[in-house]
Image (cartoon, rainbow, N blue to C red):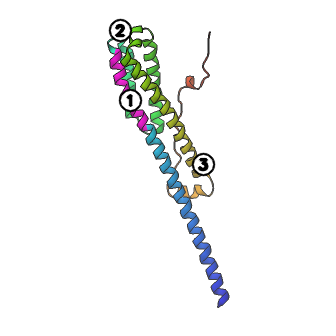
């Protein structure tokens, strides 16, 4: 009877270890998923800040660039699309469109020295530049968290647990336009 008890205790101990290991795997997936959600929330905060700055920038420029109505409307429409986007895939596409529209806007601004000298415009432009940097850092942090999550979801044996509990890979916040991937050309 003593040997049977020892075998039973070994089997129970093994079962407990396996159960604790599975619980650890599941909790690790939950932790990583929540880190990804938190990282996305950080991007969302910075994008909101960017979206809030743009109307002020456009409004300040309106008085100076009256003949550039199409450019101002393009920025406003791109902002609207970006605000309505959901998820990393849609948001990265919409934000790329907004970045392109802002690029056109700032090219137009270059033709108006009075606007470039306006203190309110300069302050808004500096704030937007600061926000763009924060978005870049938040995007990098988000992508790092997504990569960690996706590695865990794809790795054996966690992929079995992930499949059983519907943990799926998440999208990176990536550059969509080929011109943003290209090395800038410097001319003197």
**Which stretch is magenta?**
44-61
For label 2, the residue is 67
Instruction: Please provide percent x and percent y for residue 4.
Output: 65, 86
Residue 38, compared with residue 179, is above or below; it is below
Q: Residue at x 48, y 33 (%)?
A: 134
Q: Quadrant of the N terminus?
A: bottom right
Are the two marked residues, 3 and 2, in contact with CB atoms closer than 8 angstroms? no
Q: CA distance from mark 1 to mark 3?
A: 33 Å
Residue bearing the label numbered 3: 151
Q: Which residue is mark 1?
A: 51
> Left or right: where does residue 57 sit relative to residue 7?
left
**Disc on the earlier residue, 2 or 1:** 1
Which numbered disc flags the more N-terminal residue, 3 or 2?
2
Residue 56 magenta-drawn?
Answer: yes
One can see residue 112 in this view:
no
For mark 2, give the secondary structure. Answer: loop
Q: Is residue 11 above or below residue 111?
A: below
């Amino acid at each position: 009877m003593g040997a049977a008890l020892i075998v039973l205790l070994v089997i129970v101990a093994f079962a407990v270890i396996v159960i604790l290991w599975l619980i650890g795997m599941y909790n690790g997936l939950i932790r990583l998923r929540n880190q990804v959600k938190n990282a996305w929330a950080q991007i969302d905060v910075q994008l909101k800040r960017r979206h809030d700055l743009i109307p002020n920038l456009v409004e300040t420029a309106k008085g100076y660039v009256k003949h550039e109505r199409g450019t101002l409307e393009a920025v406003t429409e791109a902002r609207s699309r970006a605000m309505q986007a959901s998820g990393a895939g849609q948001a990265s596409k919409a934000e790329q469109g907004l970045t392109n529209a802002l690029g056109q806007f700032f090219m137009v601004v270059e033709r108006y020295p009075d606007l470039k000298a306006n203190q309110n415009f300069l302050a808004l432009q500096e704030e937007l530049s600061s926000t763009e940097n924060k978005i870049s850092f938040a995007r990098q942090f988000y992508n790092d968290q997504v990569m960690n999550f996706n590695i865990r979801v794809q790795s054996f044996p966690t992929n079995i647990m992930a499949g059983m509990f519907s943990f799926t890979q998440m999208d990176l916040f990536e550059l969509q336009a080929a011109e943003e991937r290209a090395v800038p050309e410097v001319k003197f």
